[in-house]
Amino acid sequence: MEIFSIFALINCIGALFISMLVFIENRHSVSNKLFTLFGLTISIWSFGYWRWLIVDFGYPETAFFWIKFFTIGSMLLPGVYLHWVLNLVQSWKWQRVAIRLFYSISAIFIAIAIILPSLFIKSVSMYEPFLYWPQSGVLYSVYIFVYFTAVFLTLILLVKNYRITSDKERQKQYFFIILGTIIGFGGGVTNFFLWYSIPFLPYGNVLVVIGLSFLGYAAVKYHLFNLKLILAELLTFAIWIVVLTQAIIADTFNGKLLWGGTLVFAVVLGIFLI
């Protein structure tokens, strides 16, 4: 289970880091603000996911609290993501209606999850290697339907605009958003199987922050794309996040000191590499 908690912590730190980079790049841009909100939502979901996975045996109430926490956090994702993409596309007549609809649905889901969480999370049970894995309630399938509807709708709009636009730079932006969406949300999908007792472990979680990285580049640097530069920066950021995660989860002072020193070295080396 340790590998999954590490994935969750990497996603949390990575999403927070990417969100801040996009916000700092242009804090007055509506698009950047929406992307930052989307990244922070992923960070909140990942934090709750991480805290849930490190709950010790014998504390089912604590595990249930963190499951409810990250489930509520994930309910914000479809609406915020759809809002960000539609703000970029700006070519769909039903744009405002869709944004308001998905935000309203998210608000209703969150209210129900707070008041009657059992409608989404029926129970928790042991499922190797997890001590407390949630089982879906009667409304959880409705939430998943809304989740995928938002993702598929944005993908359809992105592909359509990619095909009809004559602006090559804009095509690059759409391409990287499509790629990041498939990678990030595709990785996140692996979390749903065990909710229905389907024996498929959520190894795809490691892809969430990778997908978000492509979305972040599309948000701020689509007009400056250089594949070698992107790969160098992604590799550097990945190393920083992994080393920082190891420093946080180290059990001993010497371990934290060792990984902390490694982080300083990695940051300096990464800056020169970029």
Image (cartoon, helix red, strand yellow):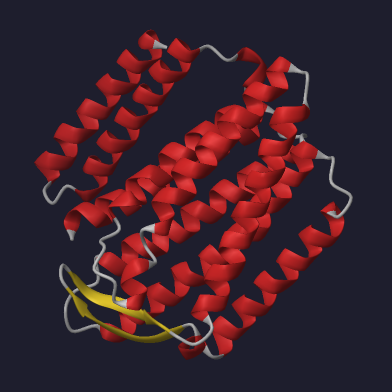
Confirm whether residue 47 shows in the render. yes
How many numbered circles does the render carry?
Answer: 0
Q: Residue at x 46, y 60 (%)?
A: 45
Residue 133 in picture, x, y percent from top left: 28, 75
In this view of the protein, which residue sits in the foreground, 220 or 169?
A: 169
Q: Residue at x 63, y 22 (%)?
A: 172
Name the quadrant containing residue 21: top right
Task: Say above or below: 192 vs 19.
Answer: below
For residue 267, side relative to residue 86 (left or right): left
Task: Say above or below: 66 vs 84.
Answer: below
Residue 207 in picture, x, y percent from top left: 38, 43
Task: Say above or below: 168 vs 59.
Answer: above
Residue 236 in picture, x, y percent from top left: 36, 23
Residue 143 in picture, x, y percent from top left: 56, 73
For residue 60, side relative to residue 91 (left or right): left
Q: Residue at x 18, y 56 (%)?
A: 2
In this view of the protein, which residue sits in the foreground, 107 or 182?
A: 182
Task: Say above or below: 214 vs 126.
Answer: above
Q: Residue at x 45, y 67 (%)?
A: 70
For residue 11, side relative to residue 133 (left or right): right
Figure quadrant of the C terminus: top left
In this view of the protein, which residue sits in the foreground, 41 or 137?
A: 137
In this view of the protein, which residue sits in the foreground, 225 or 11?
A: 225
For residue 146, side relative to residue 204 (left or right): right
Confirm whether residue 15 shows in the render. no
Figure quadrant of the N terminus: bottom left
